[in-house]
Image: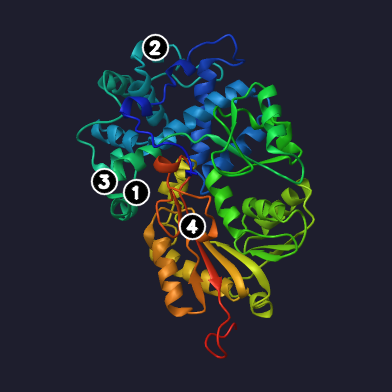
């Protein structure tokens, strides 16, 4: 069975967002087009002024504005994310015409480049009226005039600008994809579908597919993830009662496949060492039919508290959270060799999630440097490996597309931990075909229509005495 869907080769026209119509009147919308533009500008300023990820900022912003209807929220969200996905190219156009790269300038440039908005049309929206953007200034009208007839791409753009790729990642991604570089970068600029995972504790995929279709949604079973559902047109999440009941969780199909590789069995002892918000923990605990013991570890207390609420909502009672001071917390040494399965989903550059989190490409890994991130990943993997008992399974995973964070980390780990060996993907999960690597799970947006994920399965053999101490 093939992982994902057939490769797609969208050209430039197919990649362009058609948002122009969303800023003109429609009888089905509750606020004016001008008000939607101003709301988008307000939200852009929020995203630009905080270090928090855009999705978290957007969620908080809309929670404080519950009066905004679902249709309007969808328009604002789509326009904002189009601006985020075209950040580098919009900046290039503004620089070309001597304009400062600010939210309002970006919005005007996008409306002209993607939708062909003219100065006269813009005047009808940028009126300065109640809830409307301020009246256009002379230099803004001049910008719109200069951009007439242009599109978002230009032959003079550097490769990294056209690909919306930060300079630190350009060469590593070129080496990784070679002839497929353009196709993969184009796929990272598309909007992802909504993937759901059904909780087998509470329902079945067939029942949930029926319930989603009854809501008027186009929902299909995922290609390979056994509990996955793909919804093609993203609905308002508030309109999905099965999310509130815990019958389904939002989880990319690639992430579901990573959790599946843990292959946790009922009654086993399992650790999710970098659990974060608990998405993979939920999938693992459900695999175990609520039997056995799963420990969700993380160094961030807030995320663990939120994950604990998700576990309760999902009806899982075989999960415990554990706050760690660091990757070498004393708890790890006290529990060495005590677990059947250990998942190490390490912090990474997040390059595989750029289509879902387009702002992330401009936030990481400059915060700490790629070299520092690689060092942290190696320390986390080495420490977590101590928890695996002889014969147990260790799964190292990232949402990165960079070999330095993936295959290279596994190679370096095995060189100094001879008690572990790779379990080839065909042996670990023979149902997974079409991986971009013969031995590891390697998923890419263009090839598999998932986020970019990597996972290596390793088994701890029974080491001879004193060969590799667990401590």
Q: Secondary structure at mark 2?
A: helix
Residue assigned mark 2: 121
CA–CA distance between discs 4 and 1?
35 Å
3 or 4: tag closer to the N-terminus: 3
In this view, the residue in front, 200 or 157, is 200
Q: Is residue 1 above or below residue 240?
A: below
4 or 2: tag closer to the N-terminus: 2
Q: Which mark is residue 179?
A: 3
**Which of labels 3 and 4 is toward the front?**
4
**Which of labels 4 and 2 is toward the front?**
4
Residue assigned mark 4: 426
Q: Residue 221 in the image: x percent, y percent?
A: 59, 35
CA–CA distance between discs 1 and 2?
34 Å
CA–CA distance between discs 2 and 3?
42 Å
CA–CA distance between discs 1 and 3?
19 Å
Q: Is residue 136 above or below residue 448?
A: above
**Which of labels 2 and 3 is toward the front?**
3
- Callout 1 crowding tier (Cα within 10 Å): few <14, some 14–19, many ≥20: some
| Residue 447 seen in this snapshot | yes
Identify the image quadrant of residue 388. bottom right
CB atoms of marks 3 and 4 within 8 Å: no
Residue assigned mark 1: 166
Residue most toward the top?
Answer: 27
Q: Secondary structure at mark 3?
A: helix
Q: Secondary structure at mark 1?
A: loop
């Amino acid at each position: 069975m093939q992982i994902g869907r057939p490769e797609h080769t969208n050209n430039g026209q197919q990649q362009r967002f058609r948002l122009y119509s969303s800023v003109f009147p429609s009888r089905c919308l509750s606020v004016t087009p001008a008000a939607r533009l101003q709301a988008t500008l307000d939200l852009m300023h929020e995203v630009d002024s905080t270090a928090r990820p855009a999705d978290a900022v957007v969620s908080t912003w809309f929670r404080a504005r519950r009066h905004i209807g679902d249709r309007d929220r969808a328009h604002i969200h789509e326009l904002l994310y189009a601006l985020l996905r075209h950040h580098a190219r919009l900046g290039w156009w503004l620089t070309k015409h001597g304009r400062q790269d600010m939210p309002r300038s970006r919005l005007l440039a996008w409306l002209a480049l993607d939708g062909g908005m003219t100065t006269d049309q813009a005047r009808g929206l940028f009126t300065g009226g109640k809830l409307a953007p301020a009246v256009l200034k002379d230099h803004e009208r001049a910008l719109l005039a200069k951009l007439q007839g242009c599109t978002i791409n230009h032959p003079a753009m550097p490769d990294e600008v056209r690909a919306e790729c930060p300079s630190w990642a350009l060469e590593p991604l070129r080496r990784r994809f070679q002839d497929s570089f353009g196709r993969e970068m184009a796929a990272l600029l598309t909007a992802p579908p909504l993937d759901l995972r059904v909780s087998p504790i509470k329902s079945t995929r067939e029942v949930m597919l029926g319930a989603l279709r009854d809501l008027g949604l186009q929902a299909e079973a995922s290609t390979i993830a056994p509990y996955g559902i793909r919804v093609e047109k993203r609905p308002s999440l508030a309109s999905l009662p099965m999310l509130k009941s815990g019958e389904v969780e939002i989880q990319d199909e690639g992430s579901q496949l990573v959790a599946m590789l843990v292959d946790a069995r009922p009654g086993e002892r399992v650790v999710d060492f970098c659990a974060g918000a608990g998405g993979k923990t939920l999938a693992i605990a459900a695999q175990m039919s609520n039997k056995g013991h799963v420990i969700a570890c993380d160094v961030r207390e807030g995320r663990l508290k939120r994950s604990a609420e998700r576990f309760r909502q999902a009806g899982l009672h075989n999960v415990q959270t554990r706050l760690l001071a660091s990757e070498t917390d004393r708890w790890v040494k006290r529990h060495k060799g005590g677990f059947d399965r250990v998942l190490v989903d390490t912090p990474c550059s997040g390059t595989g999630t750029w289509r879902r989190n387009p702002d992330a490409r401009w936030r990481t890994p400059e915060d700490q440097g790629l070299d520092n991130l690689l060092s942290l990943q190696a320390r986390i993997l080495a420490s977590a490996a101590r928890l695996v008992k002889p014969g147990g399974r260790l799964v190292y995973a990232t949402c990165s597309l960079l070999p330095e964070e993936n295959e290279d980390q596994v190679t370096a780990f095995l060189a100094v931990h001879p008690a572990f060996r790779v379990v080839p993907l065909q042996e670990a999960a023979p149902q997974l075909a079409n991986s971009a690597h013969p031995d590891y799970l390697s998923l890419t947006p263009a090839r598999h229509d998932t986020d970019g994920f990597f996972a290596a399965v390793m088994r701890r053999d029974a080491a001879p005495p004193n060969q590799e101490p667990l401590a």
